[in-house]
Amino acid sequence: MPERHAALAPQFDSLEQQHETATLGMWVFLATELMLFGALFTGYTVYRFLYPAGFAEGSHHLDVVLGTINTVVLITSSLTMALAVHGAQLGKRKALLGFLVLTILLGTAFMGIKAIEYTAHYREHLAPGLAFVYGGPNAREVELFFLFYFAMTGVHAIHLTIGIGVLTAVLLLAWRGHYSSEHHSQVELAGLYWHFVDIVWVFLLPLLYLFGRHQ
Amino acid sequence: MSAVVTAEPSYAEAGYTVRSWLLTTDHKRVAILYMLTITLMFFIGGAAATLMRLELLTPAGDLVDSASYNKLFTVHGVIMVFFFLIPSIPTVLGNFLVPLMIGARDLAFPKLNLASWYIFVFGSLFTLWAIVNGGVDTGWTFYTPYSTASSNTHVISTTLGIFIIGFSSILTGLNFIVTIHRMRAPGLTWFRLPLFIWSTYATSIILVLATPVLAITLVLVAIERVLRVGIFDPRLGGDPLLYQHLFWFYSHPAVYIMILPGMGVTSELITAFTRKRLFGYHFVALASIAIAVLGFLVWGHHMFVAGMSVHAALMFSILSYLVAIPSAIKVFNWTATLYKGTIEFRTPLLYALGFIGLFTIGGLTGLFLAALALDVHVTDTYFVVAHFHYIMVGGMVMAYMGGLHFWWPKISGRLYPEGWARLAALIIFVGFNLTFFPQYIVGYLGMPRRYHVYPDEFQVLNVMSTAGASILAVGYLLPLVYLLWSLRYGRPAGPNPWDATGLEWQTTSPPPPENFEQTPVVTEGAYAYPSRGAPHA
């Protein structure tokens, strides 16, 4: 029997099988994630149909400029993530490390901008349950909009934070020379997860920030 | 007694310290950890049911008041559904058998598997804490706005526990799906797989796709309750029906999590004790997938009286009827397999036959509930209670007991005492029917569920039900005693006491930590029993 690779877990026969298994596991996990966000999106859709005016009004209180900047930041981070995976596949350690650092920085920048937005909403008394003061006939409906805004962007932000944590762990392992061109599943899996979180945002932007603009 | 095939210690002998169990990544040891945990849960949920049945012995509320009774049926439902039935066959028999049946050394992600158990225990602590500290009274369905605005009981910690164990379900399902796709032994094609694997696969799809919806729904309930905002509360602009839609979008598929694994076990038991290939193997295999898919499209039938357009109700009714087709395919094929089989009435087969009969009754009464007009008459009556207990207890628990006996020699290396086991199976069957059949009648006559008092004319049927429950309790306690007894005094089983096919019987009992000395190579389909006498099929 040929010598087993140090990174090969005992339940597998080959690195290839191990890699394919891990990848499938991540895809199944992303299916679960899709259903998690799907339930929130469903709730949002129901109330947007019930209260179109209130939801449009709520949407006007969001900062489209910051939302757009964040979208650019996040999509760019997807590019750097893809380049990091590419570096890992070619076994280029410097490219892997550099692009991982860039991705982490972009992710952190996104969180920073999000924090600025959240603080502004709080100051404007648009945080349901904590500080919500709103005049006008649609107050309840605007509150519901902000509730879904915070729930959806909040769950997204939790996912991004986890993503930053995962990438930091991958960065540490890459720094120690843990990966090679034949063994870098973890980089690819982290990349899949990162892209998923980015794609969710691509849907959140029009649903929350943009739809009130043309009404 | 067969000679010891290999000198290697079995999984059970691979270490005797507590640490060797708590830090194990062996799927067989994780299965045992789950077995201990859910057995404890089963008896907690059973204790709540015992108190309920005692209260219902008389029409007046003389044992507990209505508030305590509300807590009892909530505890019973929450514990039995989320902490016993959903994990039962998948986490115990599934964990133990999936790698063995497909000729793998372990699941695809052994550490994740152990993590699932820890998550399960961690989540259980929250819910148990809530029960000990005064309980929760919303019913296992947590309907809003009662659960978010009115109930003064421990809704948050209970739902938090369920939220947490949801991740355990998801990770278990994920592990099974990936394992079945990627870890099969050479030659083990999809249509050579045992049907237990097919049904576990179908169950896993539901676990992965439905559980996250419940998770986020419970988060929304917690948000509404803590922040006093109106997501589901109509007084604050919310929509209580949305809660019911989201809840049943998970909880109806979850009903199939609580029956599909039982169907898989039944297929294994029927073939082993008739010594025949399963009639219509392909149909039975694909029926599992069909049930999993259809299961996602029928949740609305829980809401016929809650407020729903006639068109939606008609669609949900028709779709619910469709579930009967794959279910009937299974029942007919099991029955056809028995025909001219070499039948041996061992304990596991008794449970399997019980499963077929009780599942059929439970399934057919399900059609009553899928019929729009009839459903209005029996909604929230004991008819519904009887219906789902025939599926969950008559179906799933019967199958779990049958599977536990069938694979006990593989798990423990010892044979259980056959006489006692047959007696227990018989007691359970009689006790079960005496408990739940009267509930169909009393429900049809109009007795609503979830009340601790009832009119005098329902007393005879309720006394029958309580008497049946006492018999059932004896039936469940007996296996606890003799299975533990058999660990020490049972006869050694040898690798294959039933002379059954299936890769799990080709290794020693109990199996070594890595399951097989050499990876088996599969050359034929499951259930390749030698045909006896004239070739009929």
Image: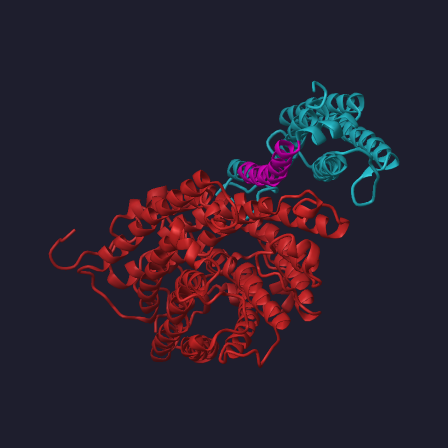
Chain colours: A cyan, B red
Relative to B264, is B420 above or below? below
Relative to A68, is A37 above or below? below
Residues drawn in magenta: A22-51
Between B529 and B117, the one lying in front of the other is B117
Residue B57: give x, y in percent of width and height: 49, 80
Judged left or right of residue B282, residue B258 is right
Which residue corresponds to the image point at 33% horizontal and 43% vertical from the top-left?
Answer: B191
Between B516 and B537, the one lying in front of the other is B537
Residue B111: give x, y in percent of width and height: 60, 51
| Overall secondary structure of the magenta section | helix
Is A45 a magenta residue?
yes
Judged left or right of residue B284, residue B39 is right
Between A113 and B462, the one lying in front of the other is B462
Q: Work out which quarter of the rendered image holds the N terminus of chain B and state it.
A: bottom left
Seen from this angle, which residue lies furthest top? A214
Image quadrant assignment for residue A181 = top right
Judged left or right of residue B528, residue B427 is right
Residue B143: give x, y in percent of width and height: 60, 54
Is B332 a magenta residue?
no
